């Protein structure tokens, strides 16, 4: 008897989302419910069939609210992943594990986010607006080691990581622009994408520097919106409304976290979270990065996409910059077509989940930048956190 | 050098795990945890050595010297407390003791920050109970007092 594995046991059967915009003036609860009902409708199931929920631990729509909204279904499994965007694919690993273990039949995976600048709706750090503007006067957590020094937000931490990559490998502004422009062109083919204006190398370089070496156009956009997915067993998914996006393999690993920059740099390259994920993931999937038809990286910053390509083995260490150059990530002829929705740089920032629903569309063949013969799709969470990744496949 | 603004910046809240670090900083010393068994330094503070898993350690003085490992220039947005000094640098210093420390190089214009730049620690009192460890260029600097008031 083979060892238990989540390989091929679960599938994404439904996807749903709200409109994405800079500010929608709606609560996360309201947007989340819309996305959840849309995902159920897409799968062809009743919301009352949901018997499990997997979310970020920072998600504000909790299990009690789900019960109240969905007519009190029997929720018999629920879990949250830590580290924000690090968990955007790990939520699918947890959902697949629950299905494989027989603990649940219909897992709801969701994220709702009111983070447009004007969308704060509470004092809590996770209740809209900029989390880093809601810090207390005294910091007892690990952020005490950098916030009092002036390093207050994620983009500044990522700037430090990005600068180190430039110091070691000579990564350039043009390579950053290559990522941003490729994803913007994908967004311009996607009516759901918030950013529709063309971007050129010149307009990228002219955007204001916010934290060297990151310019405004190197950063994800801030938007409101919600996304939901329905995960069920592969067998059941085959009998539902949509062609299943089967979770071929999935893995999680902790190896580094940007909040303690000092600890991130203290670990060996091979011991960072994504590399530890990659070795498990491709072994379970019994495939190699070269077999992937389309990839979805957690594109919070252009520079981190370049680094993730190296970490996951799509190119060698230090060669991420040249890999993305000259349309390397562009549909339809890039070296590796990535983030065909426009990603978080240009479609919306739903904490990675909008990339996952686009990955499902690639498997279904319904993307606005559809990759031909799209058999295997790679999806990764944030690469500077404890993280996870999955490989989806066609049935 | 403006070290305090009218809007208070968030400050560390010393805990039982790290209070000796802050007490040393108030005295003008950069002390870090050092494993009693394998003798390696570590930072941020933690109750066990990640190299040999020994729980025996002491807070030992360091050279306060290192080099800039990576850096950024913060140009905003940032917290209101830091807006008056925009643009400002933040650096990751690789200390001679082999550990990283996030800080700022004082009296160094943005265009002069370089990876590999030698720096040394200085101490800036920002409240009655908190002194932050900052750095200055180790060569040709000296415009900033290196001791706590």
Image (spheres, coloured by chain):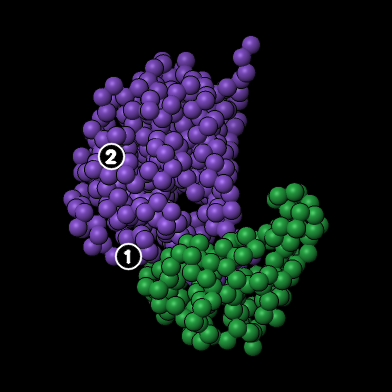
Chain colours: A purple, B green
Point out residue A159 in the picture as x, y percentages from the top left corner: 42, 59
Q: CA distance from mark 2 to mark 1?
A: 24 Å
Residue A379 is situated, as x and y percent measured from the top left of the image, at 42, 35
- Residue sitting at 72 percent across and 75 percent down? B23
Q: Is residue A178 placed above or below A283 in the rendered structure?
A: below
| Towards the viewer: B44 or B146 | B146
Relative height, residue A87 to residue B9 (above, below): above
Q: Which residue does the image show at 57% across and 28% down from the upper left?
A: A97
Q: Quadrant of residue A121?
A: bottom left
- Left or right placement of residue A264 versus residue A26 in this view: right
Q: Which quadrant: the C terminus of chain A?
A: top left
Decide which of tag 2 and tag 1 comes sooner along the chain.
1
Residue A141's spot in the image, x, y percent? 62, 61
Determine whether the residue tagged by mark 2 lies in a helix, strand or loop: loop
Horizontal side of residue A295 vs A269, given as left or right: left
Residue at left 61%, top 23%? Answer: A101
Question: Which residue is labeled 1 in the image?
Answer: A209
Q: x%, y% of residue A241? A: 36, 20
For label 2, the residue is A328
Badge 1 marks a residue whose secondary structure is: strand
Rendered-image quadrant of the N terminus of chain A: top right
Q: Residues within 10 Å of mark 1 (few under 14, many from 20)?
A: some
B138 versus A46 height, above or below: below
Judged left or right of residue B107, residue B15 is right
Chain letter of the residue beneath label 2 in the structure image: A
């Amino acid at each position: 008897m083979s060892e238990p594995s989540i390989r091929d046991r679960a599938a994404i059967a439904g996807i749903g989302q709200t409109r994405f915009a800079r500010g929608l003036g709606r609560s996360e609860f309201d947007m989340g419910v819309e996305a959840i009902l849309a995902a159920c409708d897409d799968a062809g199931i009743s919301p009352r069939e949901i018997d499990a929920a997997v979310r970020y631990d920072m998600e504000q729509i909790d299990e009690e609210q789900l019960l109240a909204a969905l007519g009190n279904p029997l929720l018999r499994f629920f879990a949250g992943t830590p580290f924000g965007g690090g968990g955007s694919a790990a939520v699918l690993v947890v959902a697949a594990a629950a299905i494989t273990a027989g603990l649940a039949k219909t897992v709801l995976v969701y994220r709702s986010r009111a983070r447009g600048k004007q969308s704060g709706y509470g004092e809590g750090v996770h209740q809209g607006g900029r989390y880093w503007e809601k810090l207390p006067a005294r910091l007892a957590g690990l952020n005490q080691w950098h916030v009092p020094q002036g390093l207050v937000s994620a983009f500044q931490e990522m700037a430090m990581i990005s600068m180190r990559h430039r110091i070691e490998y000579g990564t350039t502004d043009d390579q950053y622009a290559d990522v941003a422009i490729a994803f913007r062109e994908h967004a311009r083919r996607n009516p759901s994408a918030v950013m529709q204006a063309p971007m050129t190398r010149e307009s990228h370089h002219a955007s204001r520097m916010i934290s060297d070496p990151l310019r405004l156009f190197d950063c994800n956009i801030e938007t409101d919106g919600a996304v939901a997915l329905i995960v069920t067993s592969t067998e059941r998914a085959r009998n539902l409304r949509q062609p299943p996006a089967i979770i071929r393999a999935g893995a999680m690993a902790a190896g580094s976290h940007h909040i303690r920059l000092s600890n991130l740099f203290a670990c060996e390259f091979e011991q960072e979270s994504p590399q530890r994920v990659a070795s498990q993931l491709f072994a379970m999937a019994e495939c190699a990065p070269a077999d992937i038809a389309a990839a979805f990286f957690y594109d919070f910053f252009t520079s981190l996409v370049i680094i993730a390509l190296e970490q996951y083995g799509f190119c060698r260490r230090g060669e991420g910059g040249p890999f993305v150059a000259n349309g390397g990530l562009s549909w339809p002829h890039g070296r590796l077509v990535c983030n065909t929705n426009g990603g978080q740089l240009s479609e919306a920032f739903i904490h990675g989940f909008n990339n996952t629903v686009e990955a499902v569309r690639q498997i279904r063949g319904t993307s606005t930048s559809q990759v031909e013969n799209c058999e295997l799709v790679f999806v990764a969470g944030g690469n500077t956190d404890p993280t996870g990744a999955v490989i989806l496949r066609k049935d | 050098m403006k070290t305090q603004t009218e809007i208070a910046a968030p400050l560390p809240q010393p805990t039982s795990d790290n209070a000796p670090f802050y007490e040393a900083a108030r005295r003008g010393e950069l002390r870090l945890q050092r494993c009693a068994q394998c003798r390696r330094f570590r930072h941020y503070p933690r109750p066990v050595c990640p190299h040999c898993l020994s729980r025996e350690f002491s807070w030992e003085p360091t050279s306060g010297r290192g080099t800039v490992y990576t850096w950024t220039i913060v140009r905003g947005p940032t917290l209101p407390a830091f807006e008056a000094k925009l643009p400002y640098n933040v650096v990751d210093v690789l200390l001679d003791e082999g550990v990283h420390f996030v800080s700022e190089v004082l009296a160094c214009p943005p265009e002069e920050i370089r990876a590999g730049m030698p720096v040394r620690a200085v101490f800036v009192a920002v409240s009655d109970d908190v002194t932050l460890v900052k750095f200055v260029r180790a060569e040709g600097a000296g415009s900033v007092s290196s001791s706590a008031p």
